[in-house]
Image (cartoon, rainbow, N blue to C red):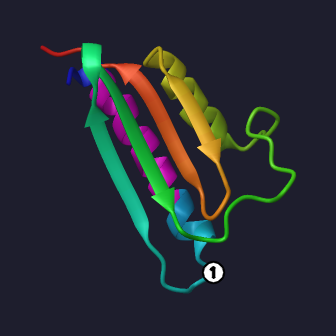
Amino acid sequence: MELSQAVPVGLILNEAITNAVKYAFNGEAGQITISFAKGEHDLVKLTVADNGRGLPENFDAMQNKSLGLQMMNGLTRQLRGVFEISGLGGVTVSLRFKLHVN
């Protein structure tokens, strides 16, 4: 992975893990799963998922003004990728983008 992609991926990964640690478990034990998989045509998918309390019922990622979500969306656009977040049975943050290799 080129540095121009590694830095935004690292920042997104850090934000997603930090949010899970801070908000998902209310001080209880929980699990955070991270996967990074390469598919056909150099497409990759990064997923950070927790088994915590999930998102509020009326949560809309597109309308949410949190700095962290805005940052993850912006960094995903920098990667020319697709950012998704869902909150049923925990929170799953994923992004898909085309990998550039040196």
Indicate whether 25 appears above or below 16.
below
Q: Give residue 30's position: percent from left, percent from top.
A: 48, 77
Quadrant in the picture for the C terminus: top left
Q: Give residue 87's position: percent from left, percent from top.
A: 67, 54
Indicate whether 97 appears above or below 58.
above
Q: Give residue 14's position: percent from left, percent from top.
A: 42, 50
Does residue 15 show up magenta in the picture?
yes
Mark 1 Cα-neighbour bin, 10 Å: few <14, some 14–19, many ≥20? few
Magenta stretch: dominant SS? helix
Q: Residue at x 53, y 63 (%)?
A: 20
Residue farthest along the right direction in this orientation: 58
Q: Residue at x 44, y 27 (%)?
A: 96
Residue farthest along the bottom direction in this orientation: 28
Indicate whether 23 appears above or below 36.
below
**57 relative position to 66: left or right:** right
**17 relative position to 86: left or right:** left
Q: Is residue 68 visible?
A: no
Which stretch did the figure color magenta? 5-18
Q: Give residue 3's position: percent from left, percent from top.
A: 23, 23
**61 relative position to 2: left or right:** right
Quadrant in the picture for the N terminus: top left
Q: Which residue is mark 1?
A: 26
Q: Is residue 16 visible?
A: yes
Compare residues 47 and 16 and report the one nearer the observer: 47
Helix, strand or loop at mark 1 = loop
Residue farthest along the front direction in this orientation: 40
> Which residue type does callout 1 highlight?
Asn
Quarter where residue 55 is shown: bottom right
